[in-house]
Image (cartoon, grey):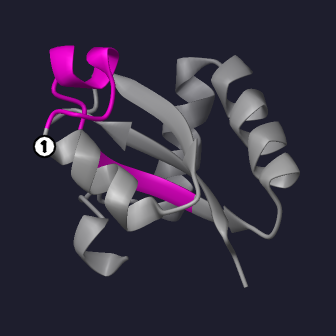
Amino acid sequence: MEEYWVYIIGNKDSAVVYVGMTNNLRRRIAEHKEGHGSVFTAKYNVNRLLYYDGFQTAGQAIAKEKQLKNWHREWKLNLIKEFNPEFRDLFEDI
């Protein structure tokens, strides 16, 4: 069972994307939606869940988060397209 999550959130038109990691995906995305997620996400209104992946250990999730943070923007958008072709907010699905 997954206990750690890596996620990508974006603003309304996905012009800005943010990669994060958490042990409670629903709570963390709710924080972003309320403007309490981080200074960066609040500043750019980045609060739409576009991608997520679950991991059994924190170490696995941290490794994936670091990998995605080092990716080019285009690679991140391609990953989102594969997972969520319509770029819809997946918050209600979790």
**Residue at figure coordinates x 69%, y 76% from the top left:** 2
Q: Secondary structure at mark 1?
A: loop
Q: Tell me, yes or no, whether the highlighted magenta stretch contains residue 45.
A: yes
In the figure, residue 25 lies in which quadrant? bottom left
Would residue 81 appear left or right of 69 to someone viewing this image? Answer: left
**Picture quarter containing residue 1?**
bottom right
Q: Nearer the viewer, residue 78 or 40?
A: 40
| Residue occupying image coordinates x 26% and y 41% | 32
Residue 92, horizontal then vertical, whole percent:
23, 75
Q: Position of residue 28 (x, y in %)?
A: 37, 52
Category of crowding for the residue at label 1, using alpha-carbon neighbours closer than 10 angstroms: few (below 14), some (14–19), many (at least 20)? few
Q: How many discs appear?
A: 1
Q: Say whether residue 65 is left or right of residue 24.
A: right
> Residue 17, image x and y in percent?
39, 28
Which is nearer the eye, 72 or 57?
57
Instruction: Classify 42 as above or below 90.
Output: above
Q: Which residues are magenta?
A: 35-52
Residue wearing tag 1: 34
Look at the image and tell me whether residue 44 can be seen: no
- Asked if residue 28 is positioned above or below residue 19 in the image, the reply reads below
Q: Is residue 83 visible?
A: yes
Image point (75%, 50%), residue name: 61
Disc 1 marks a residue whose amino acid type is: Glu
Q: Is residue 1 left or right of residue 85?
A: right
Question: In the rendered view, does 46 fall on the left or right side of 24?
Answer: left
**Which residue is the extreme one toward the bottom?**
1
Q: Position of residue 88 (x, y in %)?
A: 25, 59
* The C terminus, quarter of image: bottom left
Residue found 21% across the figure and 32% down from its top: 11
